[in-house]
Structures are given as structure tokens and as C-alpha cells.
Amino acid sequence: MPRATKATGTKTSSVKAIQTPKGLSLDLEAQVFKSIDKLIPAIEDTVAVREFGIKVTRETVARIALLRGLALMGEADNCGMPQPALKPPSKAVKATEAPKPEASTDRSLNVDGTIRTPEGWRRWGKKEKLPEQQVEIHAYYTNNGWDRYWGRTGDEVIAFYWANTAELQDLEMYDNVDANGKRVLLQETPYGPGHIVPHGWTC
């Protein structure tokens, strides 16, 4: 695994993103390193990382960013200036707005009267590892009859809580904030509200 290092007394830092027979290093500004560091919690919270027990480092994030960037450039008509994968987010009007997981719009009921889980939503398995920082928030929802799910919005995997019983869906949102001031996000759906846990949630 390449080792990230910061140059002393200069405005740029160096990270070896790829090891080849000739070797390759990149001179990166301090701001780029900050961006890499901010992405580490989000990568740690993905299903793949949790399943394989991968330790996410700067090198891991740099490799993902490099490979995705190369893929985008390969797909772009003008390789010199690839288009961004996502449009810049518009200024939020409400702090509780958040992207919703993809699902079908056909709301139907189970034989017991509960709302059938929409296609594309995956219930969190009992054997799936729960992030230690989310134990308290998980207990709040499960003790009130809600379950934890995960789904995709584009290429992003998000974790959220939802109740398949209409009578339980008026539950107040988890009111505590994490160490960085993040709050649980509300997303209205045709199946009732979902409460989304922000990426990188820390106690």
C-alpha cells in the first residue's frame, strides 16, 4: 500500500497514488489532502468496506478518486475536461432535505396490513455489523418499532430508518446531533417518512 507523506516547508504535499515499475508520485496541495480526509468516513460507511473489513486510509481514497476520474475521462467526449458526475447541489431551503433511496412507486400492502418494502430498499440484516458510533441512534428507532434499511441513490449507498406500519410513522426524529453537528435527515416518500443517517456519523 503506498504511503502518503506531506512535504515540509512547501505549499504542496506528495502522495504515491499508484505503484508501477517506474513509480509514480503526485504533488497535491494541502487542500486536496483535506478533501481526501473528509471522504474517509464516507468510504468507511459503505457496505463493501464493512463487509470486507477494509481499513480506509488516504491511499484508499486517493485510489478510488483516481480510478473514478479515469473512468469519467474515458467516457467524456472531451477527455481534456470531463463533465462532473453530479450536478453541484443547490442551496438547501430546509436543513432536513436529503436524497431518497431509489424505489418503485407502487405502494402495496402485505397480508397483515403492513406496507410492503419497496423494491430497491434492503432491510439491515441482524448479522450485519452496525457502526459503533450509531448504536444509540439504532436503539432509539428499533425500540420504537422502526427498522434499519439501506438503499442507493445513484452511486451512493445510504442508511436510513423506516417503519412499515402507518401507525408508527409519526415518530419524532432522533433529536441528538453527532460530534460534528450533523442531524438525522428527513425524507418524505410515498411509503411514509424515512429518517436518513448522514455519512460519517460520529458520537
Image (spheres, helix red, strand yellow):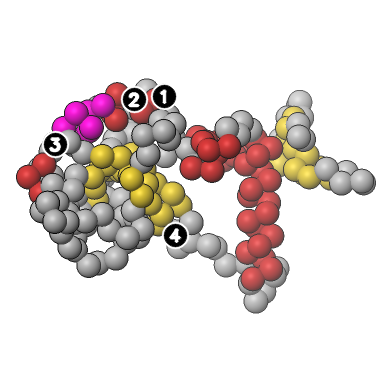
- For disc 4, the marked residue is 154
* The label number, if any, that marks residue 172 in the structure image: 3
Distance between the alpha carbons at the discs numbered 3 and 2: 18 Å
Q: Is residue 141 magenta?
A: yes
- For disc 2, the marked residue is 135
Distance between the alpha carbons at the discs numbered 3 and 4: 28 Å
Specify which label sits upstream in the sequence, 4 or 1: 1
Specify which label sits upstream in the sequence, 2 or 4: 2
The amino acid type, in three-letter code, at marker 4 is Gly
Q: Are marks 4 and 1 in contact (CB under 8 Å)?
A: no
Region of the chain picked out in magenta, as a range: 139-144
The amino acid type, in three-letter code, at marker 3 is Glu
Instruction: Locate the N terminus and report the quarter of the image it occupies.
Output: top right
Q: Are marks 2 and 4 in contact (CB under 8 Å)?
A: no
* The label number, if any, that marks residue 132 in the structure image: 1
Distance between the alpha carbons at the discs numbered 3 and 1: 23 Å
Q: Left or right: where does residue 93 sit relative to residue 43? A: left
Q: Residue furthest left?
A: 167
Q: Are marks 3 and 1 in contact (CB under 8 Å)?
A: no
Point out residue 165 in the picture as x, y percentages from the top left corner: 13, 47
Mark 3 burial class by Cα count in 10 Å: few <14, some 14-19, many 20+ = few
Point out residue 141 in the picture as x, y percentages from the top left corner: 22, 33
Q: Left or right: where does residue 193 sit relative to residue 54? A: left
Above-or-below relation of 90 to 148: below
* Front residue (pair 166, 114): 114
Give the residue displayed 21% in from the left and 56% down from the top: 116
Specify which label sits upstream in the sequence, 3 or 4: 4
Label 1: which secondary element: helix
